Amino acid sequence: MAEAVAHSASLERDARNVNARGHHDAKPGEIAIGVVIGRTSEFFDFFVYALASVIVFPALVFPYLEPLGGTILSFCLFPLAFIARPIGSQIFMAVDRKHGRGTKLTIALFLLGTSTVAIAFLPAYDQVGTASAVLLAVGRIGQGLAWGGAWDGLSSLLALNAPEKRRGWWAMVPQLGAPLGLLLAAGLFAFFLGTLSPEDFLSWGWRYPFFVAFAVNVVALFARLRMVVTPEYTELFKSRELTPSPVGATLKSQWRNIVIGAFAPLASFALFHMITVFPLSWVAVFTGESVTRFLMIEMVGAVVGVLSIIASGLLADRIGRRSLLGYTAAAIAVFSGFAPQLLNGGHVGETLFMITGFVLLGLSFGQSSGAVTSNFPKRARYTGAALTSDLAWLFGAGFAPLAALLLAEHFGLIAAGAYLLSGAIATLVALGLNKELARRLD
């Protein structure tokens, strides 16, 4: 720990030197740059693993099973990061209180990069047997712990520092990292799948995106340190009371806000994996179609997602974030009833499913961060927002690929929408029950 703290101090000093300038006001546009870079790097790591859990790990780690069985076991390891994430939040909140936000970010992002690059060296089942799955699980848990610590408060700071009439617009900015991260990850995998033989890809080609993820993390770390360690931002964090509070005390006093806040964005978080990871697994396991071609469709969908997230900012400022979340949750409920069957509709059906899904995802996910921060009193805002995000991802997204694949395999594609429907209902109930949330979002 002492070595990590010393290394962090050196990085913070470099960041301050780069950022040295006269006193200035912290503008939302400047905060947004750090937010987008940070979130894109996190989601890139996230999608590199998610895509590999479909196109690599079933064959590399579970080759003794048929493709469906291997994918199911791969998806059983997938939620480990979401389970570990709240634990990571608690650990790194303590680091934040004792050593500062810069040290916390440095350790967390190096843990994230190390866990991700360690997966790049994962030996196959043919080399080490079941130890391959154990090592993969350890790497996945390391990613989850690191994601819990990567919460830097910049998203909350952006939302609180945004102009009154433009909060929906600035609330969508952090969410741009998700489709941008997917676009980069899918592009890398599509390139290696399309240019290498299946043997070479499974032997070494798949490992390169994990190496790239480490490099991206280093760049993102420095970009974020430039902001969080400057005197201007340190004072702004304090003035907005965006400082870590004890996790236990926050849970005790804010449990209702945390629970409601976790369920409010559940529709978008459930849809998140229903149009990114699950359809890829369906195509790879059941259709025999080209995975590379479907990754290209996902890349097109990611571009649509970027545009839809931007549109969510405009709509939220016009009709209110709560209304937009409610309308999109209802639309997602309708989507869950018919859309999964489109995956059996060939190229046209798959493309329609992905484009429609990304439109809905962008409109709903674009405002999901805005449904968190303002729901807490100042003293609990930083820790409460982090815990709420952790739980929303755990309940809404962590088990989505596994649940959808199992439901589809046993009951048909129409049943895959059941998980998505439950998320939409949870969002509508949460928005309806919490009058204070409704008041603050509008």
Image (cartoon, rainbow, N blue to C red):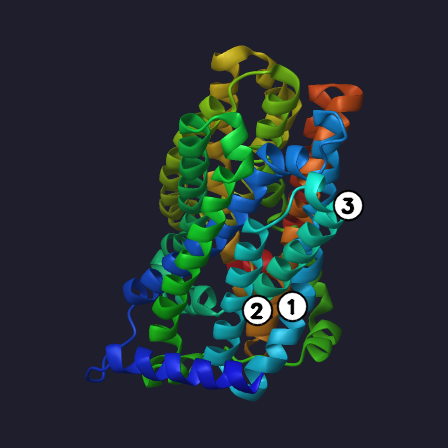
Residue underneath mark 1: 88
| Residues at marks 3 and 2 touching, judged by CB atoms closer than 8 Å | no
Q: Residue furthest front?
A: 127
Q: Relative to 213, is 389 on the left or the right?
A: right
- Residue at horizontal 60%, vertical 77%? 93
**Disc 2 crowd, CA 10 A, few/some/many (<14, 14-19, 20+):** many
- Image: 323 above or below 280: below
| Residues at marks 2 and 1 touching, judged by CB atoms closer than 8 Å | yes
- Residue at horizontal 49%, vertical 14%? 347
- Residue at horizontal 26%, vertical 82%? 17
**Disc 3 crowd, CA 10 A, few/some/many (<14, 14-19, 20+):** few
Say which of 436 and 310 sits in front: 310
Q: Secondary structure at mark 1?
A: helix
Dot 3 amino acid type: Thr
Dot 1 amino acid type: Gly
- Image: 287 above or below 153: above
The tag earlier along the polypeptide, 3 or 2, is 3
Q: Dividing the picture into quarters, in which one does residue 38 lie?
A: bottom left
The tag earlier along the polypeptide, 2 or 1, is 1
The tag earlier along the polypeptide, 3 or 1, is 1
Dot 2 amino acid type: Gly
Q: Which of the labelled discs sits on residue 400, or is there none?
A: none
Q: Which of the labelled discs sits on residue 149, or is there none?
A: 2
Q: Which of the labelled discs sits on residue 130, or is there none?
A: 3
Q: CA distance from mark 3 to mark 1?
A: 26 Å
Q: Looking at the figure, which quarter contains the N terminus? A: bottom right
Q: Dividing the picture into quarters, in which one does residue 248 lie?
A: bottom right
On the image, the x and y values in percent for residue 207 come to 50, 44
